[in-house]
Image (cartoon, grey):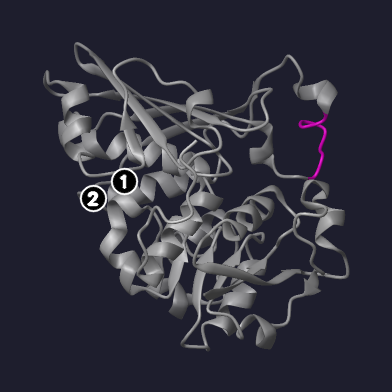
Amino acid sequence: MVKVAILGVSGYTGLELVKLVLNHPKMELNYLATSSGGEKLSELHSNLASIFEADIQKVDIKKVAENDLVFLALPHKTAMEFIKELMKFPHLKIVDLSADYRLTQKVYEENYLEHIDSENLKNSVYGLPELYREEIKKTRLVANPGCYPTGAILGIVPFLKFKKEGSPIFIDAKSGVSGAGKKCTSSTHYVSINENMFAYNPLKHRHSAEIKEKIGFFDNQDYQVNFVPHLVPVSKGMLVSIYMEVKKQFDAIQVLKDFYKNEQFIRIREKPVSMLDTVKTNFCDIFALQNNNIIYIESSLDNLMRGASSQAVVNANLMLGFEENLGIPLF
């Protein structure tokens, strides 16, 4: 059995990781920690009471290193402070759910803060299995993508070769409130979000940089990405709508089927996708429709699962040489 540590177990993604590891046939949940420690798991997540009881530790690098695999569900900056030390243990495989290793140093520092682990940053692999599967198998450090970039990139990449040169990409995305984190704020308070929907950080959200950088790597182009995220009054789920100008007519559904023909966690839909169809799964459902020179692409995923925790477990499976669907719920 692979011994597993989870750092940052108090949040929603931490809870999903706990449930996935507990149900994984080849993983043993061995170490749970937060930055402060001192609580019981059932105090943080009461739905696990009598199912799995454990004490939450304060992060201790040496104790983490006694495991084979570690997931970090920690905020940016905090994650790289630990990973810089954890990478000194050559047996340890690491999946980081923060933004700390997703971007090049220049782009990261433009959108976050100074990076303190540039050496390991260069050696990390972006954890989108459909696009970087072979690289993930060979690395010790996976940077798990953000939820919005996952849905956007998987929708955009199959159509980049058809895109009209110089035209912008527009992304309108909607997420369940869990995507904003566990801490209640003025915008996530019940009276603010109930029967309501609103954009936040339009055109300036940091995930714009992640989307732009990753799609640019495919053909070495500098794309103009206009990204507007919204919170909607549901707990989980994500719907991403993408608009691009293209240079010719083609069968958009067939393009998607050809591009993702061997991918078990991508479902190509003949009709517009539904947020509810992907909740609690690792699926990303994609639909596309062309209207003259404009293509509309739509993707659906669970922001906590495919957008975070289940994708992290898929990445861990690849790193460990397991079947990538091992321990991943289908419905």
Instruction: Determine the secondary structure under disc 1.
Output: helix
Asked whether residue 188 is drawn in magenta, I would say yes
Kind of residue sitting beneath label 1 = Ile
Q: Is residue 81 above or below residue 91?
A: above
Res 36 quadrant in image = bottom right
Residue beneath the point at 68% across and 38% down: 178
- For badge 2, the amino acid type reads Phe
- Which residue is painted at 50% across and 81% down in the image? 92
Give the magenta-colored segment's residue range.
Answer: 183-189
Label 2 – label 1 distance at C-alpha: 6 Å
Question: Residue 64 location, x and y as percent?
Answer: 65, 80
Q: Quadrant of residue 107?
A: bottom left
| Residue name at image x 31 percent, y 43 percent | 264
Where residue 150 sits in the image (x, y, percent)?
43, 43
The residue labelled by disc 1 is: 215
Residue 10 vertical placement versus 171 (above, below) = below
Question: Is the residue marked by circle 1 packed among few (<14), some (14-19), or many (20+) residues within 10 Å?
Answer: many
Residue at image mark 2: 218
As drawn, 305 above or below 89:
above
Secondary structure mainly formed by the magenta segment: loop
Q: In the image, is residue 304 above or below residue 141? A: above
